[in-house]
Image: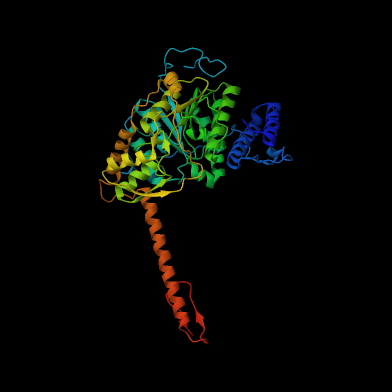
Amino acid sequence: MGLEGETATYFKNAYDQLDDCKIQEDDNEQVLNQMVVWALLAFATARNGTTPLSSSTTTATATITLTPMVRYEQPETLHEIDTSSDPAYASDSMASTLSPGSTASSDDSGEPAAFAEATPADSGHKTVLVTGGAGFVGGAVAEALLARGDDVLIVDEVNDYYDVRVKRASLAALVARYGAARVRIFEGDVADAAFMGALFAAHAPQWIVHMAARAGVRPSIQDPFVYVHSNVLGTTRLLELAARHGCRSFAFASSSSVYGEGAAEVFSEDDAVDAPVSPYAATKKACELMAHTYAHLYGLNVAALRFFTVYGPRGRPDMAPYKFIAAVCAGREIQQYGDGSTSRDYTYIEDIVDGVVRALDRPLGYQVYNLGRGEPTRLSRFIGIVERCVGRAAVIRVCPEQPGDVPRTCADISKARRLLGYEPRVSFEEGIARTVAWYKETYMAEEGLPQQPQQQQEVEQQAAAAAATALMTAAAAKAQALTALPPAAVVVVEPHAPTAMVL
């Protein structure tokens, strides 16, 4: 890993401890502890530039406690959401559906031993477990699977990372279009042992698309622990169940963030990714390590999919494409971090979904795939394209670059092309044009629509600012009144009274 001194000594000790373990059913917690330690220490090392341990801290893993993995022999009752009667899943105009877009032997490198073209797909009917199915990518994958004739079991905790109305509307749209018999929804945390154990005991899914995760670089710096819980623990829980129930194919969302501040112009799956620059990236790398472990121990077919900046209709409101389009349409200010020279390999949602489904259909042992376009776009050009598609100039405020952001991403997609037949087809210009059209139709074409999340947040912030201004004005008036009182006066100021009372 390129680490020296005390950190290298620690990792050797940790590796020796892990190597000495007999990996049995009850030892999975110890494996998880080691992976979490790796992720957090790698992040600390990358952040500080120095070893996070002293020479006396050779047993740091002993101080780390995680909730033990619960056994599943007697699962609790599984509660499935009745979308036909639950008003929370009532469809509304905020939802918008997207157009639909055999195990092989391998050598020691993980690559299939021989191939002339993309691996043939397992094209039979599937019942697929899709975690994170209320979210952006998970919902789009579920829709693509349903459109081709598969059935889906959706698991999502429907958290408030962004407006839950949007998430529930997305689920409602799937049920309305494909029927409750083909779309079964289970609301809960993928890291919850009893909940997930009961689901697997009842349905034993053989095909899994694991999209549930905490996303976002900047929020992970503020609260890394929720990212360890959702990403590392949640993925490990699912891998354990998949191995126990003989899952045939397991595809999960990793991230281009694992590449960190790599010097390479183009990011390849063969690059070393041992220096993450955010807790989010560290947890995604830890998930890849754990997936490799389960593939090695149990022969599980796992595809780790490194997404490169996914965007498109129904996109997450915290992502730049959505935020910029919403702000320019409304004539509001956008924040440009840095001088506009940073670039991202933006990938349209339909191309990402195509890659996910191809990976699911082609189980090839443990594989890592980049899913991007291989054509990065500079931030300044990105803003210009949004302006042209919206038909309005952007109001730009230049801000300092943000911690955890990387200057450039660009995917080498040759492996996905070779093994999966993956070929992105939507240019960035076309993708932004489609997203602008969706945004205008969804949020601007009809009167009386609920405010979109970013706008709602700004309205609330403006209201809070107005309230604060009113309080300051009242306080100033009170102070002025006090200076005009005689010295002997006794003043009582009630908490919310507009004026002081003289007794």
Q: Is residue 84 visible?
A: no
Q: Residue at x 47, y 81 (%)?
A: 483
Residue 318's x, y, as percent? 42, 44
Indicate the quadrant where residue 426 lies: top left
Left or right: 393 in relation to 63: left
Indicate the quadrant where residue 355 lies: top left
- In the displayed structure, 123 sits above or below 208; it is above
Q: Between 3 and 170, which is closer to the camera in this rendering? A: 3
Q: Between 461 and 52, which is closer to the camera in this rendering? A: 52
Residue 54's x, y, as percent? 71, 41
Q: Residue at x 50, y 19 (%)?
A: 364
Residue 286's x, y, as percent? 57, 33
Image quarter (top left, top right, bottom left or bottom right) of the N terminus:
top right
> How did the renderer colour the structure?
rainbow
Q: Is residue 49 visible?
A: yes
Q: Between 213 and 325, which is closer to the camera in this rendering? A: 325
Q: Residue at x 50, y 45 (%)?
A: 219
How many numbered marks, from 0 up? 0
Residue 59's x, y, as percent? 72, 38
Q: Between 222 and 236, which is closer to the camera in this rendering? A: 222
- In the displayed structure, 437 sits above or below 200; it is below
- In the displayed structure, 49 sits above or below 490; it is above
